[in-house]
Amino acid sequence: MATTAEPRFARIAALLADPSRARMLALLLAGEARSAGELARAVGITPQTASTHLAALRDAGLVAQRTQGRHRYFSLADGDVAHMLETLSLVAERDEVSTRWRRPDRQPLKHARSCYCHLAGELGVQLRDALLARQVLVANERGEFSLGRGAGAWLQAAHFDDAAIQRTQRDTVRPRFAYACMDWSERREHLAGALPKALLSQFIATGWLQRVGTTRALVETPAGIRHLLPLIRA
């Protein structure tokens, strides 16, 4: 009997349904690799249980594993997985969005956070708006974004030199250079891809943004208030 091809997401959905696996993936959304032991402690499970969960996530292509000495480090497999998790978060909380993000414990994440190594939250949306308004990025024929005529001056002001731009363009196969990603808290689009990832790395390296403890939240430093905010706010 003929069957109709359908998306094969049942296995992925079953993996995400486990609270411990879901929490580990949420921790990895920060974009930093973590050891199996760190993930076990953060989630509150034994190392053996964590290893079992991580093996299942790795086999499903949701996480990547790197071994260094006696330690195993895990990260999200790629930007597609990060995009899926951010979108699931958006859908799961859409009925509570008006109240959830007013909670004090959510305010740092709402203001600015890392989403698989690119900037999200209020600052992430403002960054997208600024890059498009100032023609640093322009839409291309694929519905993604390429550098526009305003790129040179803006990127120079962001301390992002020509060599870094060329390296980012040269290395862009996967992830893509720049594309829209629906923001979990803002319900508007921020930017994902190779360029936004490189920009966030630059903002942290220059000391304009810094992480809040071990969370995904980011905060502007005094230097960031002086130099970064004028670049992303009208």
Image (cartoon, rainbow, N blue to C red):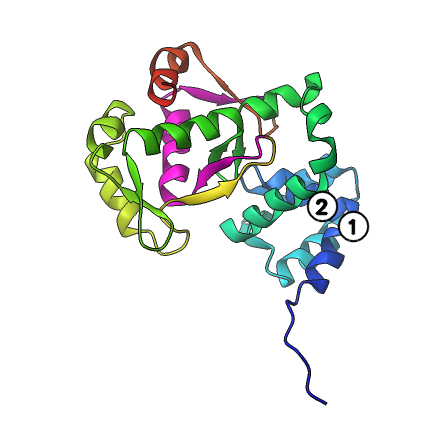
The secondary element bearing badge 1 is classed as loop
Query: Residue shown at 63%/20% (left/top)?
Result: 107
Indicate the quadrant containing the N terminus: top left, top right, bottom left or bottom right: bottom right
Query: Residue shown at 41%/28% (left/top)?
Result: 127
Q: Name the mark on residue 18.
A: 1
**Residue 197 lies in the magenta stretch:** yes
User: What segment carries the magenta color?
Assistant: 186-212
**Residue 116 lies in the magenta stretch:** no
How many residues crowd mark 2 within 10 Å: few (<14), some (14–19), many (20+)?
some
The secondary element bearing badge 2 is classed as helix
Location of residue 225 with respect to 50 vertically, above or below: above
Query: Residue shown at 20%/36% (left/top)?
Result: 149
Location of residue 72 with respect to 60 vertically, above or below: above
Q: Amino acid at mark 1?
A: Asp
Where does the image place residue 114, in percent across and percent down from the top left? Answer: 52, 33
Closer-to-camera residue (130/157): 130
Residue projecting furthest to the bottom: 1
Closer-to-camera residue (80/135): 135
Q: Are dots 2 and 1 in contact, CB under 8 Å? A: yes
Q: Name the mark on residue 22.
A: 2
Where does the image place residue 204, in percent across and percent down from the top left? Answer: 42, 26
